[in-house]
Amino acid sequence: MINNVITARIPEVFAPLLTSHYRIKLYYGGRGGGKSYAFADSLLIKGRMSKLLIACLREVQDSIKDSVYRLLCERISFYHLVDYEIRENKIINRLTGSEFIFKGLRDTDIQKIKSLEGVDIAWIEEGQSISQKSWDILAPTIRKEGSEIWISMNRENENDPLWTMLAAHPDERTFVAKVNYYDNPFCPEELKLQAQKCQKERPDDYLHIWLGQPRKSGSMQLIYPAMVRRAFEPKNILPVSPLVIGLDIARFGDDRTVFCLRQGRICHKFITFTHQDIVSIADYCQVMIRDYKPAKVFLDAGGIGAGVYDILASRGLRRVVRAVNFGSRAIAEDRYCNRRAEMWDNARDWLSSELEVQLVPNEELLNELCSVNKAYDSKGRLLLESKDEIKKRLGRSPDLADAFVLTFAEPVCEQAPPPPVCSIEKLFSDDHSGGKW
């Protein structure tokens, strides 16, 4: 009987939460749609029907107060569900044995997430803030037969990782639905009045806050998703320029060493390595120089990159290899605060060119390229936010993007014959993880 009362207060648009089985159920939209209430009520019903392990997850959870724990407690009280026992850090149903647990996905909790193989339903709240790194760990962990992942989100940007990976092109195992305040019959009248006021006075904010549309690419974003997606589209461009290689060298254990190969208006390939020492990286680079004769190799000289450059220089490759310090003075010092801002802006110019350009289609690369925000110093020079801020937002270092922008470190004028691009497949696979040649 109580379950029927709860069900009657769940808007019809959320019926699939209780009546249909999908691996992923993703609801998005604006404020007032009732997503959190519907998810909480549906899970409380399910927890009363059979024994379930339900994980309530979010990207960052410094304490239980940051989770949906409080919301669940309020709904239990609202419906007088005396069969639920509220404990300090979990909620248990005394009759069925169902258990609600609460975890953060980032930083110290990430190892704990790997052990949640017995979870029946994972509720990801604020899905727009989930990084690809966290998803790549979570998705294979929720592996129990018949398990589901429920996601509630208010879209923030066009390239939110979960939206791009799951909702933009959903498969048959993924259910996606949009719900706004006008779809919720229980939306308070006060919220409706606020929405109407916002629609009249701030129409752009209304679209984002109340209709769930991603924010428009703001003036502080350096590279827009539309630029990158246009470059992803297949084109018939002949490689007539010298080959240039950008080499971003891993600084920490989770970072990758990435080679990017670009010829003029074509970016051919990214080759990644992990857990390599400086001698091995220098060896890989030397083979590429020998076989493909690039006009220049621009490598990131920060961190251990300086050691890689020293090895290559000692082998007589100083003419080809150029060490680039992202924090050094820009070539056009009157326009850019440092070399990093200059290279990124050169990459932006390449992507926005009226001439056709071809970029390797890669959603991870898109996210990285579109993650950088810009500002200007007191002299009006372009300045980019720190790499640490970008890494915090992405959940990883933007290694692919940095390797790509390194190919724009300096103009390359040598007229070397173009290398046999197709033959690169004979030497390199898409990814290397520590093996020797």
Image (cartoon, grey):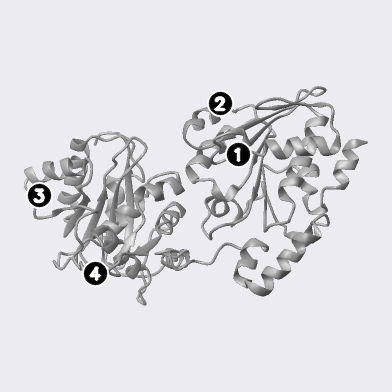
Is 429 left, or right, of 199 in this rendering?
Answer: left
- Around disc 4, counting alpha carbons within 10 Å, would you say few (fewer than 14), some (14 to 19), or many (20 or more)? some
Inspect this view and state whether residue 169 appears: no
Q: Earlier in the sequence, mark 4 or mark 2?
A: 2
> Which is more foreground, mark 3 or mark 4?
3
Q: Are marks 3 and 1 in contact (CB under 8 Å)?
A: no
Is 9 left, or right, of 283 in this rendering?
Answer: right
Q: Are marks 3 and 4 in contact (CB under 8 Å)?
A: no
Q: Residue furthest front?
A: 378
CA distance separating discs 4 and 1: 55 Å
Identity of the residue drawn at 90% across and 42% down:
5
Q: Nearer the viewer, residue 363 or 388?
A: 388
Is 58 left, or right, of 184 in this rendering?
Answer: left
CA distance separating discs 4 and 2: 52 Å
CA distance separating discs 3 and 1: 54 Å
Q: Earlier in the sequence, mark 3 or mark 4?
A: 4
